[in-house]
Amino acid sequence: MEYVKSHLEEWIEDLYKSINIEHSHQINFEQIAASLGVNIRFSPQKSFGFRALGRYVIVLDSRKEHHEQWLEFAHELCHIYRHENDLRVMPETWNEYNERQARYFAYHFCVPSFMLRKLKMPSLKGEAIKLISDNFNVTYAFAALRLEMYRKKQFLLSLNEKRD
């Protein structure tokens, strides 16, 4: 079965490869930020990102653990790279859509499909989740949902292949 990448998966893969990241052990959000010209600040408040004077800044909640900051970094990166809206003037439904999109982006950015496909997945679900969690430095719950997303896509691709 040939894996068909979504536009988002292609975009993320191209972004990672443009900064010479090909494997999960190379993922480090501080280095990613430096490679992309994004300044990171830590402060005891809810994470957010913004653009000021032509520079991108992501402020991460210093009270959170490193792996939680990684997930929030990915979420905020989506906002600054893919959403150029003034939230104060946009309808609430548009802001909710952007938030959903940023959450979805974070799953694919923190556990990129092109790296996930390289892993030899254990047959037991719990072991597969732990493998993803350990390899990509994400929470077990995050890894479980990302694995479910990945397997659903594989299943749908296999159905489509059988139909052809």
Image (cartoon, helix red, strand yellow):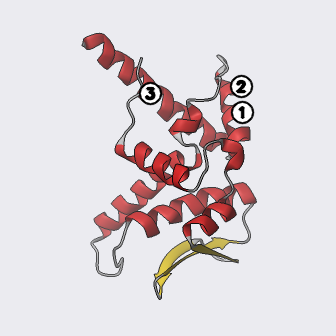
Label 1: how many residues lie within 10 Å, few (<14), some (14-19) or many (20+)? Answer: some
Q: Is disc 1 placed on a helix, strand or loop?
A: helix
Q: Is residue 77 visible?
A: yes
Identified by mark 3, the residue type is: Lys
> Which circle's residue, 1 or 3, is located before the other in the chain?
1
Residue lying furthest bottom: 53
Residue 146 position in % (x across, y down): 54, 38
Please report the residue visible at 37 percent of the width from the left and 23 percent of the height from the top.
156
Identified by mark 1, the residue type is: Lys
Q: CA distance from mark 1 to mark 3?
A: 18 Å
Q: Is residue 106 above or below residue 10?
A: below
Q: CA distance from mark 2 to mark 3?
A: 18 Å
Instruction: Judge from the rendering whether residue 100 lies leftward or rightward of residue 112; answer left or right.
Output: left
Identified by mark 2, the residue type is: Glu
Instruction: Judge from the rendering whether residue 162 lies leftward or rightward of residue 27; answer left or right.
Output: left
CB atoms of marks 1 and 2 within 8 Å? yes
Q: CA distance from mark 1 to mark 2?
A: 5 Å
Q: Which mark is on residue 130?
A: 1
Instruction: Judge from the rendering whether residue 164 lies leftward or rightward of residue 28; answer left or right.
Output: left
Quickly name the residue at label 2: 127
Quickly name the residue at label 3: 152
CB atoms of marks 1 and 3 within 8 Å? no
Please report the residue visible at 27 percent of the width from the left and 72 percent of the height from the top.
91
Residue toward you, 86 or 116? 116
Residue lying furthest left: 164
Residue 30 position in % (x across, y down): 68, 64
Residue toward you, 16 or 30? 16
